[in-house]
Image (cartoon, rainbow, N blue to C red):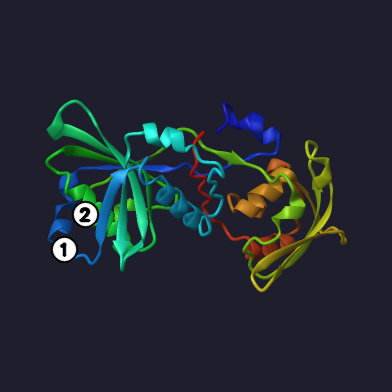
């Protein structure tokens, strides 16, 4: 989370999409209270359920592009934290989580603030929204922090949600080109001469090739184009179209290579998750 994006861009970083913040009233969720939703929601303080919380985040990371989860989570801080962890259970299995608190001084006018909101299925999402609806006598406002790809305006009719973005965009960069193999990739192949002034081990010609939907990376080959580390990072994270690289002085892929790049790495919406 940079103090200035343009400074860190010079160091090889590229900007991620901003997380979304959805605001609406609990009363707008009242139709869910009349629904017969299979499953249930369990609730506990985050300090008491931290292992379950972290285990589920690791599961989400496997399917969320660009997601980072601390490998050594701070359980002591979690014990001091007064956030509640709601977990929808479907068929006895955890299918999501919501980390939330009730904030304010007046009991009937609390802010229901959920800083983490993940789910496996629409059913699990509805269970979490129903849990929020149960707080209609305590809270008059809801604030959900969501991944950039979420579209809460489509979740429920008459929700009248207001959506804005966070003000601090995370950034990321590729540190080691050789270790980018294993990413999901569409069919295609190209070789690029990478320039990285800060990580000289990346300065080489690298061949990128998809095999059975998995990216293979090897040093060597005849370069089809030049790419800065910023260009490669934006390509792998899916944040910019390859046609933009030349405009930013990040590379020189010809149209045929741009087309291969788009097929291998279509636009996507990375979500960092961790805040620090």
Viewer-proximal residue, 131 or 241?
Answer: 131
Q: How many marks?
A: 2
Q: Is residue 161 visible?
A: yes
Q: Residue reaching furthest bottom?
A: 212
Question: Is any atom of residue 241 visible in this view?
Answer: no
Q: Are marks 2 and 1 in contact (CB under 8 Å)?
A: yes
The residue under the point 66% across, 43% down is 173
Among the two numbered marks 2 and 1 on one chain, the one whose residue lies closer to the N terminus: 1
Whole-percent x and y of residue 33?
A: 14, 57
Q: Circle 2 sits in a helix, a strand or a loop, which is it? A: helix
The tag on residue 159 is: none
Q: Which residue is mark 2?
A: 130
Residue at figure coordinates x 49%, y 33% from the top left:
168
Which residue does the image show at 79% across and 41% down from the upper left? 196
* Local crowd size for mark 2, using a 10 Å CA cut-off: few (<14), some (14–19), many (≥20): many
Residue 205 percent across, percent down from the top left: 84, 54
Neighbour class for label 1 at 10 Å: few (<14), some, many (≥20)?
few
For the residues labelled 2 and 1, the Cα–Cα distance comes to 9 Å
Residue 52 lies left or right of residue 43; in this view the side is right
Q: Position of residue 247 (x, y in %)?
A: 68, 44
* Residue 109 in the image, given as x and y percentages of width and height: 16, 33
Q: What SS does tag 1 mark?
A: loop
Task: Give the side of residue 148 with respect to residue 21, left or right.
Answer: right
Quarter of image, res 102: top left
Give the residue at x 21% y 54%: 130
Left or right of 9 in this view: 16: left
Say whether residue 214 is left or right of residue 112. right
Residue beneath disc 1:
35
In what quadrant of the picture does the N terminus appear? top right
């Amino acid at each position: 989370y940079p103090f200035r994006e343009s400074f860190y861009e010079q160091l090889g970083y590229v900007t991620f999409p901003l997380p979304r913040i959805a605001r609406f009233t609990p009363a707008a969720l009242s139709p869910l209270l009349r629904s017969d939703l299979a499953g249930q929601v369990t609730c506990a303080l985050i300090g008491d359920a931290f292992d379950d919380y972290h285990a589920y985040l690791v599961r989400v990371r496997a399917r969320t592009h660009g997601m980072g989860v601390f490998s050594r989570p701070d359980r002591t801080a979690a014990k001091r934290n007064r956030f509640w962890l709601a977990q929808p259970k479907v068929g006895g299995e955890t299918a999501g989580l919501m980390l939330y608190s009730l904030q304010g001084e007046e009991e009937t006018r609390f802010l229901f603030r959920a800083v983490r909101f993940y789910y496996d299925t629409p059913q699990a999402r509805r269970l979490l929204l129903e849990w929020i609806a149960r707080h209609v006598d305590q809270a008059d406002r809801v604030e959900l922090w969501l991944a950039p790809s979420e579209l809460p305006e489509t979740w429920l009719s008459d929700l009248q949600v207001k959506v804005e973005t966070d003000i601090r965009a995370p950034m990321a960069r590729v540190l080691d080109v050789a270790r980018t193999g294993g990413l999901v990739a569409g069919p295609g192949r190209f070789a690029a001469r990478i320039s990285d002034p800060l990580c000289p081990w990346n300065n080489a010609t690298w061949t990128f090739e998809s095999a059975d939907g998995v990216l293979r990376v090897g040093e060597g080959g005849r370069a089809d184009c030049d790419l800065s580390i910023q260009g490669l990072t934006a390509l792998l994270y899916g944040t910019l179209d390859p046609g933009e690289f030349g405009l930013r002085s990040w590379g020189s892929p010809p149209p045929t290579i741009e087309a291969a790049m788009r097929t291998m790495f279509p636009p996507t919406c990375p979500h960092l998750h961790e805040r620090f």
